[in-house]
């Protein structure tokens, strides 16, 4: 049984594809009010190439008593530890939790909240967004890397993902993958918020990008992830060009007054630098400016 917590963008994208492949799926919703509105909607709708398909996936509240053996955690990084703390009494010994959160930091928080479980980290380039409640658009096909820094043995259920058509690979160095994505997000997302521009708009600020990349490379090397530092600046420029017309996820969150995942991206990078006694003035200045920008709009810094 796949228990999927979070009926947002990625939760819906995963739950519907697993269900469509004939695999058993249970959605976990926050409370009875949310469960009632889900049941009224008749299921989760996935919109792919303008085609809508509704899937009547079973759902339960977080307070349900059914034991959980495999949990797909599909909430934001800042909600992950609390959600797992609520679910901890339901997690059997040796349960597996698949963590879809972007950035770093939430994985350790979850592992502390559920010491009886095996945590499998994911880094995904798939893209999805919510069109309406319980309706999600599959906006960008991509790839998902999965891995467990404490146990390199892949889980048997990767076969379920293959059956469900979820493009993935088992990574023997998932932490470096997560660090690389974090570095890309740190170089691009905060600047798009501060300059209020699409990703492509950053091509007007090559010096700022170069300074940030060189500090991020220093940080990655110091943290023992030199493979994640290779050709970082070229990759940043490539991602900017490939996504030039898009607003970054952080820009979308901030401009729509939603909480950002700053603490798990730039905040995490700055704390890591401090832990290693590294002085990275551009990164620290960017963090301070972003915090004050978000604060001025009433958005949290964590
Ligand atoms: P989202 O906000 O669309 O969905 C999160 C869902 O989790 C919401 O429905 C929320 O109500 C639910 N939730 C939170 N706490 C809960 C709780 N205690 N009980 C039940 N439900 C709870 O977020 P998303 O876009 O799916 O992002 C999830 C993670 O995946 C983030 O870390 C994001 O950065 C990452 N990610 C997203 C995408 C994307 O395209 N959306 C791509 C790559 C990575
Ligand atoms: O992941 C991204 C985001 O917007 O969060 C990209 C497109 C890579 C920009 O950092």
Image (tube, rainbow, N blue to C red):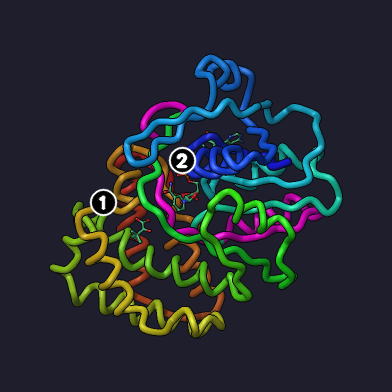
Q: Which residue is mark 1?
A: 247
- Whether residue 119 is in magenta: the answer is yes
- Label 1 beta carbon within 8 A of ligand 2: yes
Kind of element beneath mark 1: loop
**Other residues around mark 1 within 10 Å, as few (<14) / some (14–19) / many (≥20):** many
Q: Position of residue 57 (x, y in %)?
A: 61, 29
Q: Identify the image quadrant of the N terminus.
A: top right
Q: Nearer the viewer, mark 2 or mark 1?
A: 2
Point out which mark residue 9 bears: 2
Residue appearing at x 50%, y 18% in the figure: 41
Q: Earlier in the sequence, mark 2 or mark 1?
A: 2
Question: Residue 117 in the image: x percent, y percent?
Answer: 78, 54
Residue at x 73%, y 28% (from the top left corner): 63
Q: Quadrant of residue 149?
A: bottom right
Inspect this view and state whether residue 75 appears. Answer: no
View extreme (left): residue: 204
- Between the C-alphas of marks 2 and 1, the distance is 17 Å
Q: Which residues are magenta?
A: 105-134
Q: Please, is residue 97 above or below residue 225 in the view?
A: above
Res 186 quadrant in image: bottom left
């Amino acid at each position: 049984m796949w228990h999927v917590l979070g009926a947002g963008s990625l939760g819906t994208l995963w739950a519907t594809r697993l269900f469509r492949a004939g695999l058993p799926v249970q959605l976990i919703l926050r409370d009875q009010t949310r469960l009632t509105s889900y049941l009224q909607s008749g299921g989760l709708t996935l919109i792919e190439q303008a085609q809508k398909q509704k899937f009547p996936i079973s759902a339960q509240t977080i307070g349900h008593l059914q034991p959980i053996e495999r949990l797909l955690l599909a909430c934001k990084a800042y909600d992950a530890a609390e959600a797992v703390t609520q679910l901890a009494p339901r997690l059997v010994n040796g349960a597996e939790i698949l963590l879809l959160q972007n950035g770093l930091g939430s994985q350790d928080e979850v592992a502390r909240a559920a010491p009886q479980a095996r945590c499998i980290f994911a880094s995904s380039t798939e893209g999805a967004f919510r069109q309406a409640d319980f309706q999600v658009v599959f906006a960008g096909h991509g790839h998902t890397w999965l891995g467990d820094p404490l146990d390199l043995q892949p889980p048997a259920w990767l076969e379920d993902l293959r059956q469900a058509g979820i493009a993935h690979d088992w990574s023997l160095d998932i932490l470096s993958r997560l660090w690389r994505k974090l570095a890309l997000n740190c170089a691009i997302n905060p600047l798009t918020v501060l300059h209020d521009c699409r990703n492509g708009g950053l091509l007007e600020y090559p010096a700022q990008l170069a300074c940030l990349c060189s500090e991020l490379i220093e940080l990655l090397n110091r943290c023992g992830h030199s493979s994640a530092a290779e050709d970082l600046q070229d990759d940043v420029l490539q991602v900017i060009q490939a996504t030039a017309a898009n607003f970054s996820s952080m820009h979308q969150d901030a401009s729509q007054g939603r909480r950002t995942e700053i603490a798990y991206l730039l905040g995490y990078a700055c704390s890591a630098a401090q832990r290693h006694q590294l002085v990275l003035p551009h990164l620290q200045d960017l963090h301070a400016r972003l915090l004050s920008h978000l604060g001025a709009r009433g958005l949290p810094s964590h």
